[in-house]
Amino acid sequence: MATTSADRIIIALDVQTKEEGIALVSRLKDARTFKVGLELFTAEGPALFRKLKALRKDIFLDLKLHDIPNTVSGAVRSAFKHGVQMMTIHTSGGREMMAKAAEVAREIARESGRPKPVLLGVTILTSLKGADLEEVGQGSDVASQVLRLAGLAKAAGMDGVVCSPQEIEVLRKEYGRELAIVTPGIRPVWAAAQDQKRIMTPAEAVAKGADYLVIGRPITGAPSPNEAFLRVVEELA
Ligand code: C5P
């Protein structure tokens, strides 16, 4: 769990190449954790992780895994070997899939003596609305589906969930401090909203109970990314 304001901030490394990614990471000398998503991972693979490790950075691998329990837990093991600290798994993959992943996470930490990787459940993608859920047979109430899936993640031994800023409060209230909450959609007051619609400032999100904030463009697109990062840290402190 994050111990300082700086540790709460995860930088979204939304670039296409290792070179761009490393250039950005090198400029963000005070940031600790970087989120690598599908785009960059598909382009560069784990070779990127060696570079991040050499720069002494932590990795949040956001691949939103969803497969049979054996395959997902195998992927957790593989990611751990590459030094990944946090990763995402789709809660809709079911209890057994999450439980097996969580069991493997505990096992590899025990075997290696290294900290356990943090497993985060993805509930409902914010791109899906009620009608989209209905189409895939899930019922149209997004909020109750998010709550249900977060509860399943907790019961399965996952460490936390990723959610939108609007969901933080209700998840905190329902599941207490046991589930870590990671939220994107964060915009400091001095930053443009861009394509994010339902945004919250870093301080608001933390006040509502977020443990980690995923922030991309307000920091990565700033003239000095490290200064922008420190500005957010200051706002949080
Ligand atoms: O640049 P920005 O701060 O908007 O980046 C936010 C990051 O969080 C991006 O990597 C984006 O894919 C991710 N994200 C999001 N909203 C979600 C889920 C993930 O913005 N609902």
Image (cartoon, rainbow, N blue to C red):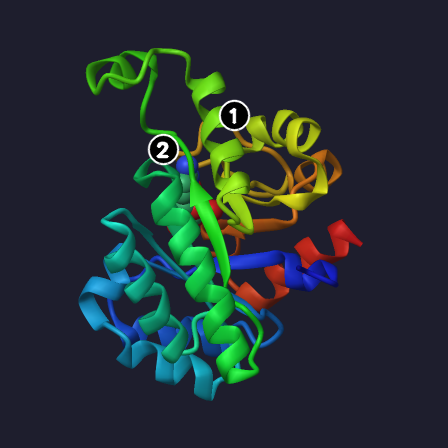
Front residue of this view, candidates 225 and 160: 160
What kind of element bears circle 1?
helix
Q: Give the amino acid at mark 2.
A: Leu
* Residue 81 in view, yes or no: yes
Query: How far across and how far down the image is residue 130, in percent?
Result: 34, 13
Q: Are marks 2 and 1 in contact (CB under 8 Å)?
A: no
Q: Nearer the viewer, mark 2 or mark 1?
A: 1
Q: Residue at x 49, y 81 (%)?
A: 111
Q: Is residue 49 above or below residue 211?
A: below
Q: Give the amino acid at mark 1.
A: Leu
Query: How far across and how far down the image is residue 227, in percent?
Result: 63, 65
135 relative position to 215: left or right: left
* Sequence-earlier tag: 2 or 1: 2
In the rendered structure, find residue 147 and report the number of the disc placed on it. 1
The quarter of the image holding the N terminus is bottom right
* Residue 184 in view, yes or no: no
Q: Residue at x 36, y 78 (%)?
A: 49
Q: Residue at x 66, y 27 (%)?
A: 174
Does the numbered disc 2 mark a residue whose Cβ is under 8 Å from ligand 1?
yes
163 relative position to 72: left or right: right
- The span from disc 2 to disc 1 (Cα, nearest Å) is 13 Å
The quarter of the image holding the C terminus is bottom right
Q: Is residue 132 above or below residue 167?
A: above
Query: How far across and how far down the image is residue 148, in percent?
Result: 48, 25
Query: How far across and how far down the image is residue 153, in percent?
Result: 48, 40
Q: Which residue is mark 2?
A: 125
186 relative position to 178: left or right: left
**Local crowd size for mark 1, using a 10 Å CA cut-off: few (<14), some (14–19), many (≥20):** some
Residue farthest along the right direction in this orientation: 237
Task: Specify the quarter for ligand 1.
Answer: top left
Q: Residue at x 43, y 21 (%)?
A: 145
**Local crowd size for mark 2, using a 10 Å CA cut-off: few (<14), some (14–19), many (≥20):** few
